[in-house]
Amino acid sequence: MVFHQLPDFGQAVSLGTTIMAVKFKDGVILAADSRTSSGSYIVNRVADKLTELYPDSIYCCRSGSAADTQAIADIIRYYLQVHAAEHDAPPPVEIAANLFHKVCYSNRGMLSAGLIVAGWDKASGGAVYNIPQGGSVHQLDISIGGSGSIFIYGYCDEFYRPDMSKEECLDFCRKAVALAISRDGSSGGVIRTCVITEAGAERDVIPFYEVKIGPPMGAPGAAPAAAEAAPMQTDVEVHSDN
């Protein structure tokens, strides 16, 4: 008799993932894949890892334990609503980042959470903050995280430019996440993006296979705009000897 080992469904649901947030000249863009897993079992292929913290101005990317990051995001969302009510104005992105820092650092021995907070406010414009496991907080122009991030550090270092337009930055983020998905077994599904500017938040989703991996728009060696629309070739031609 042959026994097959079943997946351990008792494991915590994990966002083994690829997340990123990037500043461009008019605001910020957040991007993430959509796969969540419990051990080797894929729990959700189209999860939403871009979580709204304050309407149209502040979002976060979540990696680590799905339960931990959802609970933390709910807590921060509540405090931001209280802050907005007390000051009769949208909260700054820095306030959201510091709240994440306080919650994550105070509970650092019990949480598995790596987060990126990004948004736009009148005081600082676009802003990106990284809160890794342990609860420290770092303000950056570009932040990447999750298991897939190790595969795209070189790509991001090579092609990121702070003066990118919205279209160039969106293409850069999609191609970076697509590259991570193609290499990381814990990343997959679709690519979700959120563009946040003074005008508000604009969300979008695109299938991974529709992204042509290569240099982003505006970079040396990038494909012409017409070629960017061509989907990535995914089929394999089979030849028969008969």
Image (cartoon, rainbow, N blue to C red):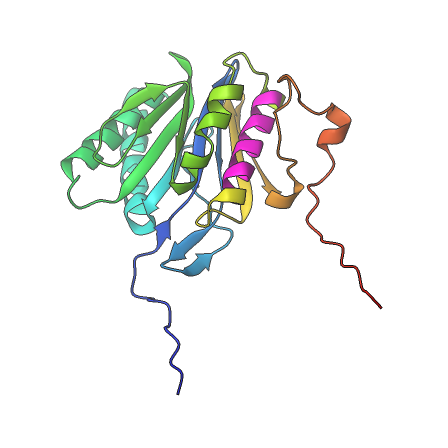
Q: Is residue 175 above or below residue 6?
A: above
Q: Position of residue 239 (x, y in %)?
A: 79, 59
Q: Is residue 169 magenta?
A: yes
Q: Is residue 117 magenta?
A: no
Question: Which residue sits at x=30%, y=61%?
Answer: 11
Query: Which quadrant is the C terminus positioned in?
Result: bottom right
Number of marks drawn: 0
User: Which is the main secondary structure of the residues drawn in magenta?
Assistant: helix
Q: Is residue 152 left or right of residue 134?
A: right
Q: Is residue 114 visible?
A: yes
Of residue 27 and residue 142, the one placed in the foreground of this image is 142
Q: Is residue 34 left or right of residue 150?
A: right
Q: Position of residue 7 (x, y in %)?
A: 37, 67
Q: Residue furthest front?
A: 241
Query: Which quadrant is the N terminus positioned in?
Result: bottom left
Question: Which residue sits at x=38%, y=80%?
Answer: 3
Q: Is residue 32 above or below residue 123?
A: below
Of residue 59 and residue 224, the one placed in the foreground of this image is 224
Q: Is residue 214 above or below residue 184?
A: above
Q: Residue furthest bottom?
A: 1
Question: Which residue sits at x=71%, y=44%?
Answer: 233
Q: Position of residue 83 (x, y in %)?
A: 28, 26
**Which residues fall within the magenta stretch?**
168-181
Q: Position of residue 161 (x, y in %)?
A: 52, 15
Q: Quadrant of residue 95?
A: top left
Q: Is residue 92 visible?
A: no
